[in-house]
Image (cartoon, rainbow, N blue to C red):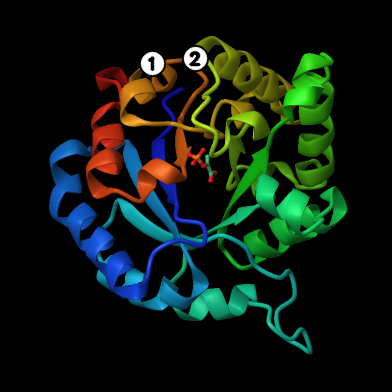
Amino acid sequence: MKRNTIIAGNWKMHLSYPESVQLTEQILSEYKNYINNHTKIILFVPFVYAQSIARLCLHRGEIYVGVQNMYPEKSGAYTGEISPTMLNSIGIKAVIIGHSERRTLFHEKDEFLAKKVKSALEHHLIPVFCVGETFEERENNQTQEVIRTQVTKGLFDLSSEEIKNVIIAYEPVWAIGTGKNATPEQAQEVHSYIRSLLQTQYGSSVSDTIPILYGGSMKPDNAAQILQKPDVDGGLIGGASLKAQDFIAILQSVPQSNA
Ligand code: PEP
């Protein structure tokens, strides 16, 4: 089963507005040389720039603009929050849900994240649902248990039809922003475990179609080896997505067999 390869950038809370436009324009001027029908790009940008960046990327079939969070209600008295309907109205196509920074710094729990995933899907936004263990959990051999809990609680209330529209990102917490990536073998081991959970719950006709991205210090010099693993369907890239040359170099690392 051929799955799309997805190269996604998470800009987090970085860049000024002019810098974000410049980065987008650099990516737009080069990506065509390195992309094909099976590769898609998603730029997860700060809310305040989302509409402008979405306009810049309009009519580029393979490049989508997403945001890094959303609130699961359509509208209401939720001061400071952004709803899925607002995102729909400015052309946003995807949303990161459950990034470890949201789970840790903003105390977002599995049940709340499950609500966000459901709400995103109801509004035709693609949720990129993040899971991953801490260093301590890995050292204590709890990686599978942590991943199983996050996947089960976050996603398994969805129907087969719903989950087909979800992207999962495996992001070991110890690898995010640390310069210390998972080895290709460690990534493959967890990705194939996640796929086995999906298969048990939904069957292989569903589990075979769901892209599972790796995130955690992916860089031009380690991307090719990680991306060539069979259950790794792309990357969610933080630091290296802030420089057009690095992001494009990662795009170039997509194995030709996936291309
Ligand atoms: C991320 O923000 O999801 C991420 C993986 O960051 P970095 O690539 O900087 O580790």
Q: Is residue 120 visible?
A: yes
Q: Residue at 81% x, 29% y: name it.
A: 146
Kindly state the secondary structure of the residue where label 2 is placed: helix
Where residue 211 sits in the image (x, y, percent)? 52, 34
Foreground residue, 123 or 234? 234
Find the residue positioned furthest to the bottom. Answer: 77
Q: Is residue 58 visible?
A: no
- Classify residue 151 as left or right of residue 120: right
Looking at the image, residue 7 lies above or below residue 144: below
Q: Which residue is mark 2?
A: 184
CA gap, disc 2 and disc 1:
6 Å
Mark nearer the N terminus (2 vs 1): 2
Q: Which residue is mark 1?
A: 225
Occupied quadrant, residue 193: top right
Where residue 57 sits in the image (x, y, percent)? 28, 65
Q: Residue at 68% x, 82% y: name it.
A: 80
Disc 2 residue type? Pro
Q: Residue at 76% x, 29% y: name it.
A: 147
Find the residue positioned furthest to the front. Answer: 178
Q: Badges 2 and 1: C-beta atoms under 8 Å apart?
A: yes
Disc 1 residue type? Gln
- Classify residue 36 as left or right of residue 129: left
